[in-house]
Amino acid sequence: MDDTQFQSLKQLEQYISHYYPVLKNSHFTKFVNNVYMTAARNKIELNELISNLYKGIIDIQAFENSKNGNIYNFKRPDLPEEYRSFLMGIKDITEGSNGGMASIGKCEWLISFCSGVNIQTDKPYVEIIKGGGDLKYTLSNKNVELKWNGGKVSVKKSGMTVDKIFSKLITNRGIINNTNKWVPFRNKDKNDEQKNIKNGLYWQAISDEIFQTLTDNQLKEKIINTSFKLLFETCDVFIMFNDDGRFQTFENIDDVNLYYQDKYDLLSGNKGFECRANQSNHVALYCYVF
């Protein structure tokens, strides 16, 4: 590394330490190294990169106002294609924590680091936060929760707890003894009427609401609604991402219902729900963009 390259590296370190002081010690070093190598692999000069990081590689206002799309397509249109590859190269960076002992997740650095700096406040347009979400859009003052490719939103009740209540309910109804640990959506019920009764009791175990029967799709809708209502108690915006960069944004429960209204049949297997009988995992929806 010659003197010019070394000075550029020091400028990158100064930029990161100034705008992202949350990064300390080995987290700081790993973050600088990852950014440096991603730039080098895409033949982007560091001075040029720093200038564009300050201006914003992502058009954050366009992204914030979009319900869906692909995050990589929100590269500032005046920048060359190398910057799209740069965005793709840093989406996996998860260095540091948000201050609440939770790890920073995929895409959080991509959005915050690449959305630019507000010249009036000398702070990033998108800040990494602790509590009430993962990021804050500083212009709109909205807190944002991110989930990446299979991240979960849940009813905040463990599968083990739900199973204990469900087992009592189903035994009291005289349907079965739940020694085989029945859970919904596993397609092992030959009798739809019996399955729908179990679905109703399973929902009662989650919510205390009484329904004589619920179809699979009705139960899916209720789990989704409850999970997102709980989530929106702590954040303003929810974004889920797929590995290819596609995203879907929700700002309220109406957005959620509109998105999922024709997708219940797609929610199965590892792209469906987590319903455990013997574990403390919460009953939850896996988040994927369809």
Image: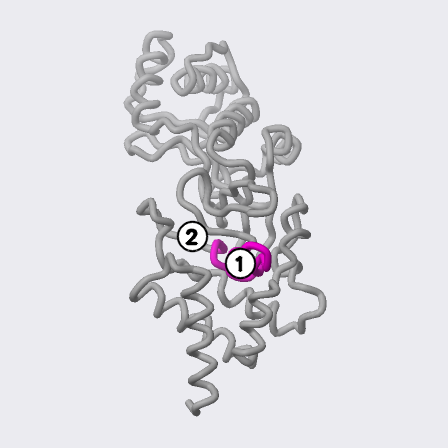
66 vs 155, left or right, is right
Q: Residue at x 55, y 47 (%)?
A: 138
276 vs 50, left or right, is left
Tell me the SS state at disc 2: loop
Alpha carbons under labels 2 and 1: distance apart? 24 Å
Bounds of the magenta segment: 107-124
Q: Which residue is mark 2?
A: 105
Dot 1, how many residues are within 10 Å of its Cα: few (below 14), some (14-19), or many (20+)? few
In the image, is residue 158 part of the stretch drawn in magenta? no
Q: Residue at x 45, y 32 (%)?
A: 186
**Amino acid at dot 2:** Gly
What label does residue 122 carry, if any? 1
Q: Which mark sits nearer the N-terminus, 2 or 1?
A: 2
In the image, is residue 109 part of the stretch drawn in magenta? yes
Q: Is residue 123 above or below residue 234?
A: below
**Amino acid at dot 1:** Asp
Q: Quadrant of residue 81?
A: bottom right
Q: Residue at x 37, y 57 (%)?
A: 22
Q: Position of residue 54 (x, y in %)?
A: 57, 66
Q: Quadrant of residue 34?
A: bottom left
Q: Are marks 2 and 1 in contact (CB under 8 Å)?
A: no
Q: For this rendering, which residue is in front, 169 or 131?
A: 131
Q: Position of residue 268 (x, y in %)?
A: 51, 38
Q: Is residue 151 above or below residue 13?
A: above
Dot 2, how many residues are within 10 Å of its Cα: few (below 14), some (14-19), or many (20+)? some
Number of marks drawn: 2
Q: For this rendering, which residue is in front, 169 or 204?
A: 204
Q: Position of residue 131 (x, y in %)?
A: 40, 40
Q: Position of residue 214 (x, y in %)?
A: 52, 17
Q: Residue at x 45, y 40 (%)?
A: 152
187 vs 71, left or right, is left
